Image: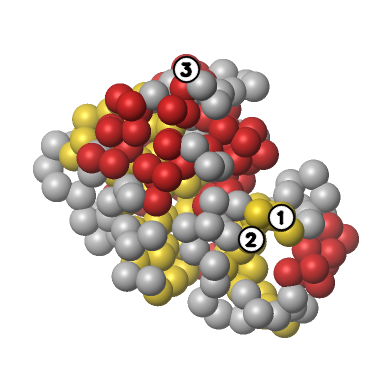
Amino acid sequence: MNGTIVAAGSLGALGAVFRDNSLLGLPADADIVVLPTAASFTGVAEAAVAVAQVCNEFDVRIEALMVTDRASSAEPYFVGRLVNADAVILCDGSALHAKTVWRNSPVGDALKSAARLIAIGSVASVLAEVMIDPRGGAPTIGLGLFSDVAIATTASDDQLARTRSLVGEEIALVVLGPLGIVERANGAWRVVAGDDVIVTRGSEVSAL
């Protein structure tokens, strides 16, 4: 993917992403679409509203796309909106459900063409080639938008140690706490809010 990807550890970090416009470089009155697929089990409407409330103080227009299952992931209108929007926000929730809906679907392909992706919480893991299964921390297959980094959210010390050993040293594992933010732009990664981000290769602390 050639566009910008920002991974924020939680909804609480989303406001910081928009306040620092150097991250996204959004135009005035930016067209933002919200994809609440991962929140299907807890409420897609509620998740989209929560994101909209955070964005209300900024100069953006918001539309939620109710992509909740494989059937809706083939809807041409949704695909077109994802490709043409100034930015796409991916709601937190079940990363595995999001993967099931998006992988090998028109919506999943559209995400690869998005100008800017902002992934909240565990859903950021889905975007990588190596996704971290939240049920036990093992690596599995994601959407493949990038291959040099795997992203996980905080877990027990034992689970994170297992994840690090299974991922190995070839790719960087980024563990995002609730306030952590990382960015991928022009193919390069950087830590934006580092107090809540841990980067490792194998068992060793590393840098992006």
What kind of element bears circle 2? strand
What kind of element bears circle 3? helix
Q: Nearer the viewer, residue 156 or 145?
A: 145
Q: Residue 192, located in which quarter of the rendered image?
A: bottom left
Q: Quick check: marks 2 and 3 in contact, CB under 8 Å?
A: no
Measure the C-alpha gap from mark 3 to mark 1.
29 Å
Q: Is residue 141 visible?
A: yes
Measure the C-alpha gap from mark 2 to mark 3.
29 Å
Dot 1: within a 10 Å radius of its alpha carbon, few (fewer than 14), some, or many (20 or more) residues? few
Identify residue for label 3. 45
N-terminal-most mark, 2 or 3 = 3
Above or below, comparing residue 46 to residue 165 in the picture: above
Q: Amino acid at mark 2?
A: Val
Identify residue for label 1. 140
Left/right of residue 160 with respect to residue 67 in the rendered view: right
Report the residue at 67% width, 39% height from top. 96
Q: Point out residue 160 in the picture as x, y percentages from the top left corner.
A: 78, 62
Identify residue for label 2. 130
